[in-house]
Image: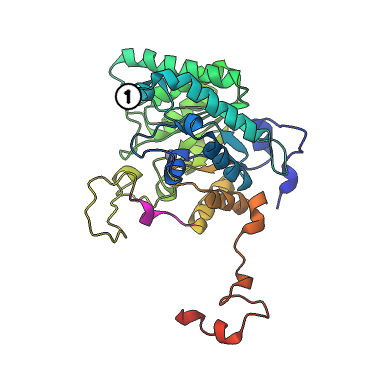
Amino acid sequence: MNNDKRGSRNKKRSLIERLNLGPVICAEGFLFEIERRGYMASGEFVPMVSLEHPEALENLHKDFQHAGSDIVQAFTYNGHREKMKVIGKEDFLEPLNRAALKIAKKIADSPIDNEPNLMAGNISNSNIWNDKDPKTHLEVEKMFVEMVGWAVDEGADMLIGETFYYAEEAYKALEVMKKSGLPSVITIAPMGENIMRDGVSILDTCKKLEQLGGDVVGMNCFRGPATMMPYLKEIRKALKCHVAALPITFRTTEKNPTFFNLPDNNGCLCHTPHKTTFPTALDPMQVNRYEIGKFAKEAYDLGINYLGVCCGANPMLIREVAESVGLKVPASKYRENMSRHFMYGTHKRVAKHMRDYGDKA
Ligand SMILES: [Zn+2]
């Protein structure tokens, strides 16, 4: 366990210092996990939780921190002006952002037994960017500028721009983030056509993001391990900067490269055809801890040091990512220990008649 690569309680190293020494873990996917915990409507997906149930958001961050996330990403995904307009709550935009940033900062600065975490401000896909309508570009830029401004104001250590499926929107996000002077992570999320929606290839988009000064460039969301890995290999080979890999936790396939069209009849026993598959019935296609661990190890062995999990992430999977690249985290204390299992255990008190029954159970 290369725990010595982690810093001390009193010193907060920068993102790049940490990446230069080894793996850095980042939990994402808060929309799904907060929805699962009962504090957000699926489909609407607005992180009002920072105002309505701040304690639930604090707990989410604490759980991921305990599981080994080095970064506490402020939960402002979808908390942008456009989405707030859609739900008629534009007045809550700034309070929501500031509350989410303050909560993330509080947890980042209260580490469990290690150096403080990094607090990350967050911007993401606007869903109004239209490559054929330059007016939307200005509107999106304004959204990025105000959110980055609040993040800087609230003491962010770094910024994450994520889930971009238009290349030009990602470039714009990076441009705005770079102006803050903070380390900037930029990750793209191409949809099922396996190309950015404005026609730029995945690899060319990443190359350009490196040229534009991205400190960490890579992929997050939409794709599970199987359909993200092939692109990560190309990206890692072509780029010199640090690379990021944060897949969703579902078994996407070549035929269904993203979770948007993943057929949910695959294992669902309710016998009711689901009209839409996203994202309320994907559970049977969830990857297990060993699959996510295998992905993280493979990525790390390729030279990808920024590792995490996006939609579908839970603390157990984040712990698995951390441990698969040799880290010991607070939650490692509770990793599975079959030696004491009542039937499959090896402890001398496990009765032979129970051990013998294991294959019939
Ligand atoms: Zn995601």
Q: Quadrant of ligand 1?
A: top left
- Residue 45 drawn in magenta: no
The answer to whether one can see residue 236 in this image is: yes
Q: Position of residue 41 (x, y in %)?
A: 37, 38
- Horizontal side, residue 312 vs residue 216: left or right: left
Give the residue pinned by disc 1: 86
Q: Of the residues shown, which amino acid type is indicated by label 1?
A: Val
Predominant secondary structure in magenta? Answer: loop
The answer to whether one can see residue 214 in this image is: no
Q: Residues within 10 Å of mark 1 (few under 14, many from 20)?
A: few
Can you tell me whether the CB of the residue at mark 1 lies under 8 Å from the nearest atom of ligand 1?
no
Q: Position of residue 43 (x, y in %)?
A: 33, 37
Q: Residue at x 64, y 77 (%)?
A: 346
Q: What's drawn in magenta, residue-wise?
A: 281-288
Q: Residue at x 22, y 56 (%)?
A: 272
Q: Position of residue 74 (x, y in %)?
A: 54, 31
